[in-house]
Amino acid sequence: MTSTLEPVVKPTDPSLRRWVGPAVVAAVAYVDPGNVATNLTAGATSGYLLVWVVVAASLVALLVQFQAAKLGVATGLSLPELCRERLPRWASRLLWAQAELVVLATDLAEFVGAAIGLRLLFGMPVAPAALVTAAASMLLLELRRRGRRRFEILTAAALLLIGAGVLYDVFAVGHQSAAGLAGGLAPRLDGVDSALLAMGIVGATVMPHAIYLHSALARRSEFRVAHAVGGRTPGLVRRALRLDCGVALGGAALVNVAMIALGAGLGALTAGEWTGDILAAHGEIADRVGGAAALAFAVALLASGVSSSGIGTLAGDFVMQGFLGRRVPSRVRRMVTMLPAIAALLAGAPLTGLLVLSQIVISLGVPVALFLLVFFCRDRALMGGLVNAAATTRIAASAGFVVAAAGLSLPVLLLL
């Protein structure tokens, strides 16, 4: 496939820093409330045992998002758009249905996280907290309409805020062990509970909607360079994408490791009395460490919920437009997709139960997005100079099978 788009950057431009952006937006999906809940529980119940799972899952995420960005750059199309063009109509519609379920489940987790953050900060009941979260996500959507770069900057600020809040609490809570953290890098499990947590971490880390979103953002960004520019273009694009993905997803990986360390420290501080509940975590931090640390925790959780909610909205737009070739006004679509999450919160559904349910649904969408991505990125006629090397395809496919197995096993184990 040959793109008709004109180059928007010079292929010899040495300044790659200004190209950082799409991966930062996608990286917010990797520090959403589902990650917070899973990592804190892992730290509280298993200490540093599962640090290696976070690192391994983050490396897979880096590989996956790098491929998603390459796909958008090489083809000028998002992953959903490629599916619509290259697959039978019935298959594209079926893929759209499962992707919409993933986006709705993602919205559910993000609304729960933001609602908990508002409750912790202001004592706000869940019902009004849900409405405030809805309003905040609409504001983020409006900001995106007014300029892509502003949206990316705000998203980067949210990512930094989440990281700063978590890291501050890690040091404030204390009870950390450098030796224990290093030991957590050795792959091992300790019984069924730790295996379940490991699969939950993998399922919460590799996010299907982030794959769809990143492929769409990269095709529109400064990365987009027409194939006809010359032989130097693939090398330049690869360097730029590595910088973008490395900075953003490396930062997200650090935050996720810090979440496990926070869970481990708080578990040690409470002598095992706290076992991972988010609401209880805030109370324990306030009582045992102080108001500043509790405030940092609540702000980080609120930033996680609100920012990732905006990302979910944007991903939903690209999913519908790509798979179906139809575009619904963003405000209308957002109001519709928010309704299940708002209704669940207004009905008083248990917050932890909603987070678990959302992770089950999301885990079912992981293998679909991964294998579609590997299938297209191995096609030289489609990808040109950005095609995956044979070794990359084998590694990505193997990682896809492992992540898919973990994702498909998670709902089974959770429902046993």
Image (spheres, helix red, strand yellow):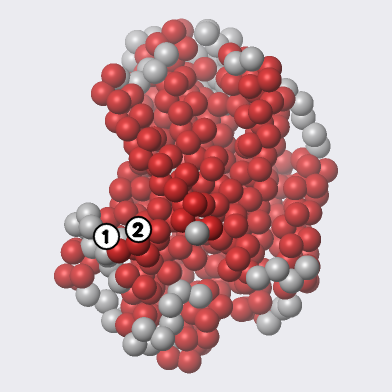
Where on the picture, by quarter, is residue 33?
bottom right
Q: Residue at x 52, y 17 (%)?
A: 75
**Left or right: 274 in relation to 157:** left
Dot 1 falls on a residue whose secondary structure is loop
Q: Position of residue 243 (x, y in %)?
A: 36, 38
Q: Position of residue 343 (x, y in %)?
A: 78, 61
Q: CA distance from mark 2 to mark 1?
A: 6 Å
Query: Which of these two is toward me, 392 or 167?
Result: 392
Helix, strand or loop status at disc 2: helix
The kind of residue on which mark 2 rests is Ala
Q: Is residue 303 above or below residue 247?
A: below
Question: Which label sits on residue 195?
Answer: 2
Residue under label 1: 189
Badge 2: how crowded within 10 Å, few (<14), some, or many (20+)?
A: some
Task: Give me the residue at 33% from left, 44% from top.
Answer: 59
| x and y percentages locating residue 290 in the rendered image | 46, 89
293 sits to left or right of 153: left
Q: Earlier in the sequence, mark 2 or mark 1?
A: 1
Q: Nearer the viewer, residue 56 or 226?
A: 56
Residue 62, image quadrant: top left
The percent position of residue 311, horizontal first and vertical second, equals 61, 47
Does residue 301 lie above or below 10 as drawn?
below
**Is residue 298 left or right of 255 when viewed as pictured?**
right
Q: Are marks 2 and 1 in contact (CB under 8 Å)?
A: yes
Name the quadrant containing residue 185. Answer: bottom left
Q: Residues within 10 Å of mark 1 (few under 14, many from 20)?
A: some
- Residue at 52%, 85% in the rendered image: 283
Of the pair 166 and 348, the residue shown nearer to us: 348
| Tag count | 2
Q: Which mark is residue 40?
A: none
In this rendering, the answer to whether 370 lies above or below 57 is: above
